[in-house]
Image: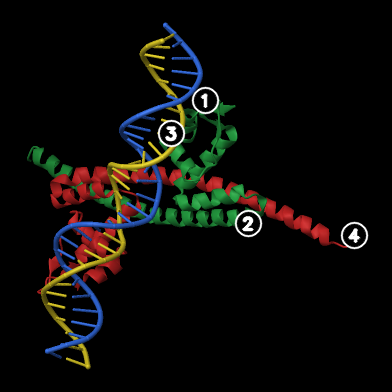
Chain colours: A red, B green, C yellow, D blue
DNA sequence: GCTTGACCTGGAGTGCGCTCAAGCTCCTAC
DNA sequence: GTAGGAGCTTGAGCGCACTCCAGGTCAAGC
């Protein structure tokens, strides 16, 4: 099974332009071409692209992704280095999530505060429209 | 208690240049100045800056932070809008953390794979150096 | 009074990750 | 055979969030 660039883009959630851009900067190996010179992506290509988008989502810079991609191309001997990259990235994701967690707490606190302000306001309104005793 | 720009930068984890930049683009109200024309940050200023850095960490674009800051300046009447912004941001953080979680699972899987490759390799080595029966 | 260092301003420059434009080719369908 | 649509290449442009620079001011310490 092969895919056009539009289908590949759809499958991995990138734009067509971005796919070509990734190829240009050497982040992905150029896919095969059909008789008309158009790119044809294999299932394997798609899987790799999907994995790359996961790395991107974790905030890995393209520079490092390219390094990883190069190592992957260089074969089994680089497995230890690749593992190291992923282990570090995992640590960085954990750290980032912890940061986000404290930000969430700040947000929750602020939102609660706004909630209280609203309630006080509504309370005041209720009292104002109440039939006086 | 007041702080120099260097102290303010230290306190909120931004660079001096970034503090001035934030002021220039209208993200923070200009702090007071001393007799020599230098910025003097109050505790309140610092607290606000710290909160802003939290918003930044959540990935809120500066454009929106500026909107929020403007609303905060406009007083109590904008509380509902400000709350809405924070509630949305919270949702976006939750979504992002969920994404990161699935990325983590992919990373874990890949790392485990590398682990297995290493073990197999070590096993092979052990067998090769073993005294033959 | 002179040096030093922190701070000032306005404006230019940077790095990242795309994104778009122009002008072309190819295939398909009518 | 021609119109339309997808795809091609090269190269420029963009938005974001800073970051740096040049040239100046000011206050403190020697």
- Give the CA distance from mark 4 to mark 3: 58 Å
Residue wearing tag 4? A132
Rate crowding at label 3 as few (under 14), some (14 to 19) or many (20 or more) other CA atoms within 10 Å: some
Residue tagged 3: B16
> How many marks are shown on the rendered structure?
4
| Chain bearing mark 2 | B
Q: Is residue B86 left or right of residue C24?
A: right
Between label 2 and label 3, give the one nearer the viewer: 3
Q: Upstream in the sequence, badge 1 or badge 3? A: 3
Cβ atoms at labels 1 and 3 below 8 Å apart = no
Q: Chain of mark 3?
A: B
Q: Residues within 10 Å of mark 1 (few under 14, many from 20)?
A: few
Q: CA distance from mark 4 to mark 1?
A: 59 Å
> Image quadrant for the C terminus of chain A?
bottom right
Q: Which mark is residue B80?
A: 2
Q: Quick one: B43 or D2, which is closer to the camera?
A: D2
Quadrant in which residue A43 is drawn: bottom left
Q: Mark 2: few, some, or many residues within 10 Å (few <14, many ≥20)?
A: some
- Where on the picture, by quarter, is residue D11? bottom left
Alpha carbon distance from label 1 to label 3: 18 Å
User: Pointers 4 and 3 in contact (CB under 8 A)?
Assistant: no
- Image coordinates of residue A110 in percent, x first then y, are 60, 48
Q: In the image, is A48 to the left or to the right of B108?
A: left
């Amino acid at each position: 099974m092969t895919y056009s660039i539009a289908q590949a883009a759809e499958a991995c959630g990138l734009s067509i332009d971005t796919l070509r851009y990734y190829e240009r900067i050497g982040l992905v190996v150029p896919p095969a071409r059909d008789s008309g010179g158009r790119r044809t992506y294999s299932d394997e290509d798609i899987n790799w692209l999907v994995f790359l988008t996961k790395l991107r989502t974790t905030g890995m810079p393209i520079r490092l992704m390219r390094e990883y991609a190069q190592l992957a191309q260089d074969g089994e001997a680089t497995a230890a280095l690749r593992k190291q990259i992923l282990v570090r990235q995992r640590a960085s994701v954990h750290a980032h999530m912890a940061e986000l967690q404290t930000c969430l707490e700040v947000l929750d606190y602020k939102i609660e505060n706004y909630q209280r302000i609203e309630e006080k306001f509504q309370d005041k309104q209720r009292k104002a429209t109440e039939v006086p005793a």
